[in-house]
Amino acid sequence: MNLLVLGRGKTGSLVAEVAAERKHHVRSVDSKENADGAALTREKLRDINVVIDFTTPHSVVSNIEACLRARVNMVVGTTGWYSEVDRLRKMVAEHDAGFVYGANFSLGVNVFLEAARAAASALRHDYSGQIFERHHVHKKDAPSGTAIAIRRVIREASGGNELEITSFREGEVVGLHEVVFESNLDRIYLCHDAKSRRGFAEGAVRAAEWLAGRRGFYEFKDVWSEL
């Protein structure tokens, strides 16, 4: 496939590397090259099968809009824009495009989400719960999109319990998420500790492969098991 990667940060660069290893034709652009959407015109996207976005909350929505207007499928790993989900879902349908987004494209994190969903039943049995997340000092949003996804999964599975999220920004931590359920009798810990960003990158590229030729609006947590 012909892939365009938006963002040359640590994760975006790794996405481009993984995509090339998987024999795709890859082009990547940074924010300067894409100023005012210069890299996302219909003409420049003509031969692109899927655009993969790992940019910033500030620029991601305009990137999505430009790609959808050009009817190009898109995988979005950037977080911090989810207040726009309903509007952009309608835009995907209007432009007959394919779209996958996710707070975290690591397969391990999505297994962790399923574990959190199962463990959420503890909140129906006199347990309290809390979510902790740690990331590198360069991460711009807090709490993380993954922590928010964990909270949503637990809320849905437990009948409305809204857990507090505590965020830490320190050093070069790739991503550490913990869920703690506690009662007077015992304590339950769930933890996912990312060793590198490669898991995020591989998941994003595999999502792009899955999306090729498809139409519709998807969340990665609902499709990862099909990859």
Image: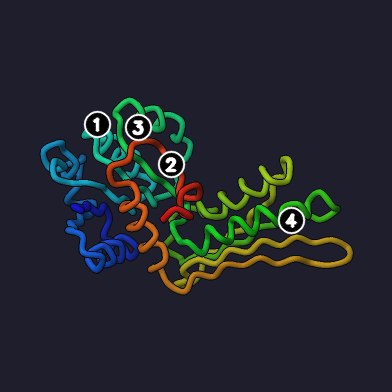
Q: Is residue 155 left or right of residue 89?
A: right
Q: Residue furthest top?
A: 94
Mark 1 or mark 2, earlier in chain: 1
Type of the residue with mark 2: Tyr
Mark 2 or mark 4, earlier in chain: 4
Q: Is residue 47 left or right of residue 119?
A: left
Q: CA distance from mark 4 to mark 3?
A: 36 Å
Residue 163 drawn above or below residue 37? below
Quarter of the figure with residue 213: top left
Residue 107, horizontal then vertical, whole percent: 47, 61
Type of the residue with mark 4: Gly
Q: Which residue in the structure is indicated by mark 1?
A: 69
Type of the residue with mark 3: Val
Give the numbered dot on residue 129.
Answer: 4
Q: Is residue 42 left or right of residue 91?
A: left
Q: Is residue 42 left or right of residue 76?
A: left
Residue 47, horizontal then vertical, whole percent: 13, 45
Quarter of the figure with residue 85: top left
| Element class at badge 1 | helix
Q: Which residue in the structure is indicated by mark 3?
A: 92
Tag 1: Cα neighbours inside 10 Å, few (<14), some, or many (≥20)?
Answer: some
